[in-house]
């Protein structure tokens, strides 16, 4: 939340974050000051605009995309939520041309250099040339099926940002890692690699995806998801800055549905969703509107 000077009845307290000083403030400040400080925290949290991403993965053709376009246009979509859909590369231009203006388009991958002999890859420059402003990087399927390392994901993130794209950067643990109590170790390691590549965090959304909950119908409980998001924000505060920790948006990406989205959206450190299969269906509108 940054550095603030809180004037108290007897002196002042210099603070850097919300949680670590509350007890000291209770001892030294008036109720009105405490209330003002709490309000400052709420305003700062509210400043993180809710962001819902729909990852279509390797699904869709022009007919299906037209159906998606129609229910997205019908909506209505919450104007206070940023909406981004991840589209298969062959349909980026078709989707961007037909989707409503309040829905942004992302590629689902890109490479770490501008051009060259990299058969099958696309570059950030190509994505921008089509008028698209986002890319999803580090998705668990890229990491597990295609063997992308933390280092490669970080290199891709760095180049995408340098080229002017916004990035949804994905992190998350497998079921084996969760059962071994390695969730925080894994997501901190992945985040550390990404953080080293980021200069402007306003262009980055983190997406926490418990791999064991993707496409399985399982989902972390709202409490489990909140715990990891809160821990991630703590890691960012300790290793990047308090300002970044407070401002960066962290999506939850584990089989979110219209039935589960509203409870998840109430958690203070969940700033949106990265949705897979549900983004291909009209229920996606309800997920976009989870904060309403």
Image (tube, rainbow, N blue to C red):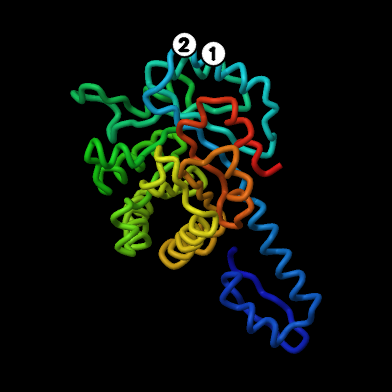
Looking at the rendered structure, which numbered label has been put on residue 62? 2
Query: Residue 147 in the image: x percent, y percent?
Result: 22, 40
Query: Residue 48 in the image: x percent, y percent?
Result: 61, 50
In the image, 115 versus 213, the foreground residue is: 213
Q: Secondary structure at mark 2?
A: helix
In the image, 143 versus 287, the foreground residue is: 287
Q: Residue at x 64, y 77 (%)?
A: 22
Q: Residue at x 58, y 27 (%)?
A: 103
In the image, 260 versus 23, the foreground residue is: 260
Is the N terminus in the top left, top right, bottom left or bottom right quadrant?
A: bottom right
Query: Residue 175 in the image: x percent, y percent?
Result: 33, 52
Mark 1 neighbour class, 10 Å CA radius: few under 14, some 14 to 19, many 20 or more: some
Residue 100 to residue 9: above or below: above
Residue 10 to residue 194: above or below: below
- Circle 1 sits on which residue? 66
In the image, 130 versus 89, the foreground residue is: 89
Q: Residue furthest top?
A: 63
Q: Secondary structure at mark 1?
A: helix
């Amino acid at each position: 939340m940054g550095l603030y000077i809180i004037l108290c009845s007897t002196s002042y307290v210099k603070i850097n974050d919300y949680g670590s000083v509350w007890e000291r403030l209770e001892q030294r400040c008036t109720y009105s000051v405490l209330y003002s400080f709490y309000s400052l925290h709420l305003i700062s949290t509210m400043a993180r605009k809710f962001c819902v991403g729909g990852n279509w993965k390797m699904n869709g053709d022009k007919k299906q995309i037209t159906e998606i376009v129609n229910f997205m246009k019908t909506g209505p979509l919450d104007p206070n939520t940023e909406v981004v859909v991840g589209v298969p590369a062959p349909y980026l231009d078709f989707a961007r041309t037909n989707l409503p203006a309040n829905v942004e388009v992302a590629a689902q991958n890109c490479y770490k250099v501008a051009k060259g002999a990299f058969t099958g890859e696309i570059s950030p420059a190509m994505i921008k040339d089509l008028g698209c402003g986002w890319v999803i990087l580090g998705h668990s399927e890229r990491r597990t099926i295609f063997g992308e390392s933390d280092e490669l994901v970080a290199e891709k993130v760095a180049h995408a940002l340098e080229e002017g794209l916004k990035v949804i950067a994905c992190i998350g643990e497998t079921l084996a890692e969760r059962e071994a109590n390695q969730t925080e170790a894994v997501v901190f390691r992945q985040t550390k690699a990404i953080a080293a590549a980021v200069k402007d965090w306003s262009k980055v959304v983190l997406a926490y995806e418990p791999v064991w909950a993707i496409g399985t119908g399982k989902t972390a409980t709202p409490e489990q998801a909140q715990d990891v998001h809160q821990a991630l924000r703590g890691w960012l505060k300790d290793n990047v800055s308090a300002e970044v920790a407070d401002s960066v948006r962290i999506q939850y990406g584990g089989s979110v549905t219209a039935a589960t989205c509203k409870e998840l959206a109430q958690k203070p450190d969940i700033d949106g969703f990265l949705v897979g299969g549900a983004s291909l269906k009209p229920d996606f509108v309800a997920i976009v509107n989870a904060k309403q």
